[in-house]
Amino acid sequence: MKEALHQETPMPSRFNKNIPLLGFAAVLAVIFAYGGVMSFLYGHGVWGTSDEVPWGILITAYVYFAVGCTGLCLLSSLAHVFHFKPYESMGLRPVILAIVSMITAFIIIALELKYVLNMAIYLVLSPNFKSVFVLMGMLYGAYLVFLILELFTYALGYKKLSRYLAIVAIITGVSATSNLGLVFGSLVARSYWTAPMMPIMWIVSALVTGAAALIILYYFVDREQSRANTNHLVNQFRKLLGYFILGYFALNAFHIFMGLTSSNLERQEAANFLLFGDYAINFWVMEVGILVLALAVVFLLSNNQRAIMMSSVLVLIAMMFARHNTVTAGQIVSLTPDGQGPIKILSYSPTFVEWAMTFGAFGIIIIAYIVLEYVVVFVKDKFGKKEVPAATEATETM
């Protein structure tokens, strides 16, 4: 009997039988644990940051996973909120992936802060609501709570309530991401971050990351049992990924062009640093080159699911470098008291500990995703409402 499309593939996924994937995730998790322990014990002593370049690749990783979480949430709304038929078989999986991405982002920022307990205490005792950092923490904290509530109300069978929570989560997530952009944009001394294109770029890059992550997820989900569904979803997100990359290219090109032609010397030098300076390979090869390659695969090899999946892996790597390039370029020009002094280009290179935490975090996400799927299935089976037959449900909605 031919498999019907748009029918959700049951959870849990059979990732526990994918030994290579589990082994890869375990290795990454161990690498992350090493970097986390070293960072907790020694902090800036094992990082490449300095007083002049205080935000390293751990800030990049936090931004990457937090913003990627928003992209996943926005894309999950295509089925959960707006009920677009081509995406109805997504189910809860994008929300689960968004939750573990957000938790991973919080773990990274906690280790980057080192004394995160002090922040938690004083955030409660004496919060400064004028601080964009405080608002960022509150918004992302609320966002995570709404995502968790959305997930478990859906699992328990309260789908209408879950849909309302999804709408609130989307609003909170976009607000949190916009506020995160404000953290950078409000630093008027860092002119490269205060450009008008930056807020839109944050959202579009979130969609790029989210679409690539979902292509990888649905490529691996129970392909033997639900190949037609997973192939269909991969193809849908392939199209979206291509359009999102084109949008990101257009915005980034305009952003850099405005930097090159700006009357602000610091912004000019930051753009030159990316295009022709020490980070030129990071920009042209690891960001632009990989995204161009992925774009070619998405549009020219549309029937090759494996090629699309592998190009999506490269997109996730490219977007990590894109975040790293943006965060570093904004700090790499030395500040002068009056903005008229000689321009000095600083230096920053991430250490092994920083790279270990950044890329090891993907292992944490894979393992946490598998565990959370089983938790959701347990809650659904133990406490959830009985499913209404499709024919009955259709009659009720008429």
Image (tube, rainbow, N blue to C red):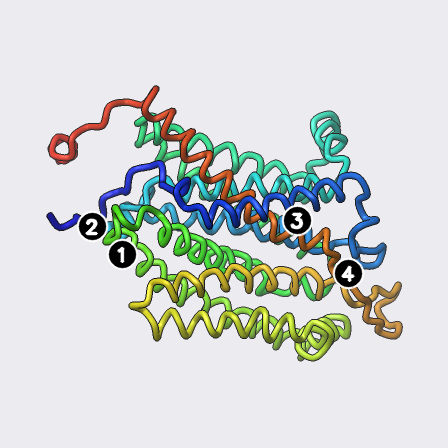
Give the label, 2 or 3, closer to the camera: 3
Mark earlier in primary sequence (1, 2): 2
Residue 121 point in image, percent of width and height: 73, 27
Q: Amino acid at mark 2?
A: Leu
Mark earlier in primary sequence (2, 3): 2
How much space separates mark 3 and mark 1, taking CA atoms?
A: 34 Å
Give the label, 2 or 4, closer to the camera: 2
Q: Which mark is residue 232?
A: 1
Q: Which mark is residue 5?
A: 2
Mark 4 sits on what residue? 189
| Above or below, comparing residue 375 to residue 304 in the picture | above
Residue at the (44%, 63%) spot, across then down: 310
Discs 4, 3 touching: Cβ within 8 Å: no
Q: Amino acid at mark 4?
A: Ala
How much space separates mark 2 and mark 4, taking CA atoms?
A: 53 Å
Secondary structure at badge 3 equals helix
Residue at the (62%, 44%) spot, across then down: 30
How much space separates mark 1 and mark 2, taking CA atoms?
A: 8 Å
| Above or below, comparing residue 75 to residue 280 in the picture | above
Give the label, 3 or 1, closer to the camera: 3
Give the label, 4 or 3, closer to the camera: 3
Mark earlier in primary sequence (2, 4): 2
Q: Amino acid at mark 1?
A: His
Q: Amino acid at mark 3?
A: Met
**Left/right of residue 256 with respect to residue 145 in the rendered view:** right
| Above or below, comparing residue 265 to residue 107 in the picture | below
